[in-house]
Image: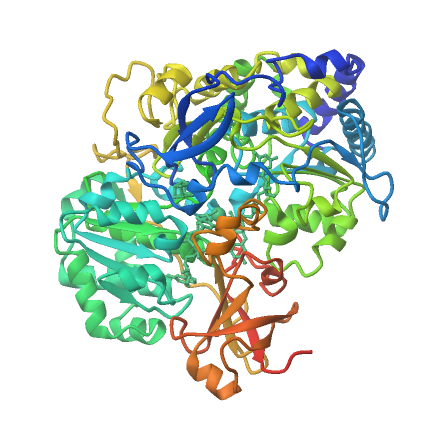
């Protein structure tokens, strides 16, 4: 038993002794809990601006209110991110709020198999306490866990992570950011010393060569793509993607690499850069470690070997190396085609290595730049208290635990001295019966988790499952014992951090339906009922919580202690981290590492490299094709709980799920476009419409992730360093017959 577990048990007993009942007046107290019914701070007949709550681009939208309710919106011209542009999801951002699928009251299922019934918040909060407590008492703190998100405000996720770990005594808590950004986090930490995407969006406009790897910007980040189009330097735009995506079609060059050959490919480019002497030797010498060993490592990645593995001709490899090493401003951008792989972290680092060896970092138009996914994935990386201790600290370091405990004014023993299990190990824990209580907030894993043919059966192993969501109709909510109805974006105040580290503001411009509460208020209520409300007294409201986050960040690379509260964020078009106390610089676009100093102990960046890993499930005789998955259209968001509520977005997206199949494969199978066919992997089999197109390579198929069936096929395998799921490759067979 760890020190934490022992101390935790004692404190657990103590805090329960001062657990008081929740009174109706406490729930109703205006202001403190931000109830749906509490009026907004925004004037009732005003136009106010706030950032969008879908993707990590972080566009600002002007919201027009009448009688205190948002009626319409327009894109904000004065914001440094989107400059008057928005994508369809942004334009339709208010539509998901008004839906009869909204969760409007807590719902409790007394027995599995029975329908849940509405209960009041008092009953809900007491049930939460009375069902989790005996599990912890009997099986210890490792028998419960939470799954957080990148889609609520930083203040809320920090409060959630603090209550779950310090209040309830949980050790294990991860989030959907593991599905998405864990690779970038790990890669940056090892290479730069801290999880620090270095760029600002202006770099899209300042580049001469824009290299997009496994990133379908036109679909997934359309407003970033607009920023690329605003580049006046006639840039080369190179898209490295096995599919001829919408982005590849718009690029100046598409490099149709064979799936999963990226690591070999980038080591091969490094080999050629070294061979040709196209290096920034001064930068390498002064600001980097381990280059010589890396150079030795890539010696084996000869052009013929690389051409064979990647399918890209030697002349093209040479031309690309010359372009990257030409001394022009080169920026490298990557997204899920890199992060979601079985050798994801090393692939991300192979891209970072190219930027380092050519000195393409810290200068306008350069960088090794991971593009973030969800609206607050960056916030969750810093403040969710899941993989890192709040503010980018380390659970395993005593000094960090003392610092955080001091700021929060809680006993240090309440802070776990070990890291959480990663997401997949939590799910395995549920499967094996080790984890018996689970609290899921703002994520829908019964649709989005990898290789989950029977996720409902997995969740059925739990003694108690709580789902906190804005809708009661999600695939995950359908399995819950207790559903906690949450207010959504637009119904609450707080901050989100976008892909270029810009903190943006969200505001309450609409009333939450029925009894729904903000996630912040729900956590406050639960903490009170749990009996540890006193420890979170200072978390009065989101802005007070933001001040706590500022203190937690002090002295860290992500220091934001100099921000003058929500006012500055609101008035200045967001504020990028870092912004330590005493900052006077107010440029709207700031990038990291302009001084060549990184966050490692000796301030040097590291070349990190590895041997090439084994593909966990290559195509074979029985399953001869490779399945790739990803985003299908700019109007569909993930599991579609939100986007399907908008008639406009439904119309813009495809009517049903489809599989992209190369004409040659369709020909040999005798399949025609629109025909219903079977796609099967070792885990499951689905019936799906064929869409015949040469945008996919022969031997590969692509299925969007937006329908629940897709992840019945995917293979639960993970990058060994980041533990991110390998969503973008498994072996399947395609059959004309349907069963
Ligand atoms: N409309 C819309 N926008 C979104 C989202 C959404 O659901 N809908 N989600 C948001 C989120 S959370 C995220 S994380 C981002 C994701 O944004 P992206 O990562 O751009 O989107 P994906 O389609 O998942 O994957 C990108 C590309 O990776 C390619 N790929 C697959 N395998 C490989 C490979 O082996 N090598 C290479 N080089 N490429 C490969 C795929 O062909 C695909 O085109 O989008 C964000 N924006
Ligand atoms: N096959 C395949 N699977 C994938 C991927 C892939 O490329 N291929 N991509 C992965 C990636 S990158 C990601 S990020 C995940 C996304 O997977 P999920 O996180 O499961 O997807 P979402 O649909 O965004 O789920 C968010 C949930 O939060 C709810 N919600 C929204 N706002 C709020 C709020 O303010 N409060 C509360 N309490 N709830 C709210 C929504 O209703 C929804 O149920 O999917 C992953 N799954
Ligand atoms: S690009 Fe992203 S942040 Fe901008 S409007 Fe669209 S979904 Fe919202
Ligand atoms: Mo994501």
Q: Position of residue 332 (x, y in %)?
A: 28, 51
- 592, above or below 543, in the image: below
In this view, the residue in front, 256 or 718, is: 256
Quadrant containing the C terminus is bottom right
Q: Position of residue 309 (x, y in %)?
A: 36, 73
In this view, the residue in front, 37 or 466, is: 37
Whether residue 720 appears in this view of the structure is: no
User: Viewed as shown, does residue 628 lie left or right of 709?
Assistant: left
User: Viewed as shown, does residue 676 lie left or right of 463?
Assistant: left
- 476, above or below 684, in the image: above
Residue drawn at 78 percent across, 15 percent down: 19
- 293, above or below 95, in the image: below
User: Viewed as shown, does residue 533 lie left or right of 718?
Assistant: right
Whether residue 233 appears in this view of the structure is: yes
In this view, the residue in front, 196 or 138, is: 196
Q: Position of residue 454 (x, y in %)?
A: 71, 59
Quadrant containing the N terminus is top right
Residue drawn at 38 percent across, 16 percent down: 567
């Amino acid at each position: 038993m760890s020190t934490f577990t022992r101390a935790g048990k004692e404190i657990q007993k103590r805090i329960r002794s001062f657990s008081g009942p929740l009174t109706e007046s406490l729930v109703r107290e205006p202001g403190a809990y931000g109830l749906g019914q509490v009026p907004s701070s925004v004037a009732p007949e005003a136009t106010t601006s706030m950032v969008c709550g879908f993707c990590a681009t972080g566009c600002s939208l002007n919201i027009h209110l009448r009688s205190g309710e948002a009626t319409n919106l327009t894109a904000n011209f004065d914001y440094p991110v989107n400059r008057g542009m928005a994508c369809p999801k942004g334009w339709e951002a208010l539509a998901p709020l008004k839906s009869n699928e909204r969760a409007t009251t807590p719902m409790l299922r007394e027995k599995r198999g029975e329908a849940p019934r509405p209960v009041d918040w008092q009953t809900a909060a007491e049930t939460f306490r009375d069902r989790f407590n005996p599990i912890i008492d009997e099986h210890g703190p490792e028998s419960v866990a939470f799954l957080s998100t990148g889609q609520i405000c930083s203040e809320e996720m920090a409060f959630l992570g603090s209550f779950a770990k310090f209040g309830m005594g949980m050790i294990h808590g991860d989030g959907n950011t593991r599905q998405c950004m864990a690779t970038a986090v790990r890669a940056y930490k090892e290479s730069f010393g801290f999880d620090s995407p270095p760029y600002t969006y202006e770099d899209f406009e300042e580049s001469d060569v824009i290299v997009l790897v496994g990133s379908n910007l036109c679909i997934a980040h359309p407003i970033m793509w607009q920023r690329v189009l605003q580049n006046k330097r006639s840039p080369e735009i190179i898209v490295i993607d096995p599919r001829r995506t919408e982005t590849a079609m718009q690029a100046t060059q598409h490099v149709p690499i064979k799936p999963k050959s990226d690591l070999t490919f980038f080591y091969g480019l490094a080999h050629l850069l070294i061979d040709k002497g196209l290096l920034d030797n001064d930068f390498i010498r002064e600001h980097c470690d381990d280059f010589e060993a890396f150079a030795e490592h890539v010696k084996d990645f000869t052009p013929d070997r690389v051409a064979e593995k990647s399918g890209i001709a030697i002349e093209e490899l040479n031309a690309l190396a010359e372009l990257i090493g030409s001394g022009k401003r080169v920026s490298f951008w990557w997204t899920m085609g890199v992060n979601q792989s079985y050798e994801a972290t090393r692939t991300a680092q192979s891209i970072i290595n190219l930027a380092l060896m050519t000195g393409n970092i810290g200068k306008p138009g350069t960088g090794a730049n991971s593009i973030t996914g969800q609206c607050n994935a960056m916030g969750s990386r810093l403040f969710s208290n899941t993989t890192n201790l709040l503010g980018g600290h380390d659970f395993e370091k005593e000094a960090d635990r003392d610092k955080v405990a001091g700021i929060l004014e809680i006993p240090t023993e309440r802070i776990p001295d070990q890291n959480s299990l990663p997401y997949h190990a939590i799910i395995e824990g549920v499967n094996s019966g080790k984890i018996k209580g689970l609290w899921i907030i703002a994520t829908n894993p019964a649709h989005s988790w990898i290789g989950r043919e029977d996720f409902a059966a997995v969740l059925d192993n739990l003694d108690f499952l709580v789902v906190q969501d804005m809708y009661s109709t999600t695939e995950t909510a359908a399995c819950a014992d207790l559903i906690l109805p949450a207010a959504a974006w637009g119904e609450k105040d707080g901050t989100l951090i976008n892909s270029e580290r810009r903190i943006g503001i969200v505001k309450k411009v609409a009333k939450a339906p029925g009894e729904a509460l903000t996630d912040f208020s729900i956590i406050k209520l639960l903490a009170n009922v749990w009996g540890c409300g006193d420890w979170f007294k200072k978390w009065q409201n989101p802005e007070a919580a933001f001040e706590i986050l500022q203190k937690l960040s002090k002295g860290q690379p992500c220091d934001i202690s100099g921000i003058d509260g929500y006012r500055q964020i609101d008035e200045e078009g967001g504020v990028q981290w870092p912004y330590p106390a005493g900052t006077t610089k107010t440029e709207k676009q700031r990038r990291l590492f302009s001084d060549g100093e990184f966050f490692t102990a000796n301030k040097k960046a590291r070349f990190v490299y590895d041997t090439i890993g084994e593909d966990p499930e290559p195509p074979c005789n029985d399953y001869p094709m490779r399945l790739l998955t990803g985003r299908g259209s700019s109007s569909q968001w993930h599991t579609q709980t939100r986007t399907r509520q908008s008639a406009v977005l439904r119309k813009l997206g495809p009517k049903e799920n489809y599989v992209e199949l190369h004409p040659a494969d369709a020909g040999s199978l005798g399949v025609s476009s629109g025909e219903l066919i079977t796609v099967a992997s070792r885990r499951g089999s689905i019936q799906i419409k064929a869409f015949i197109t040469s945008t996919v390579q022969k031997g590969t198929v692509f299925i969007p992730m937006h329908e629940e069936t897709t992840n019945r096929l995917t293979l639960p395998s993970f990058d060994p360093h980041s533990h991110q799921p390998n969503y973008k490759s498994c072996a399947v067979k395609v059959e004309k017959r349907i069963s």
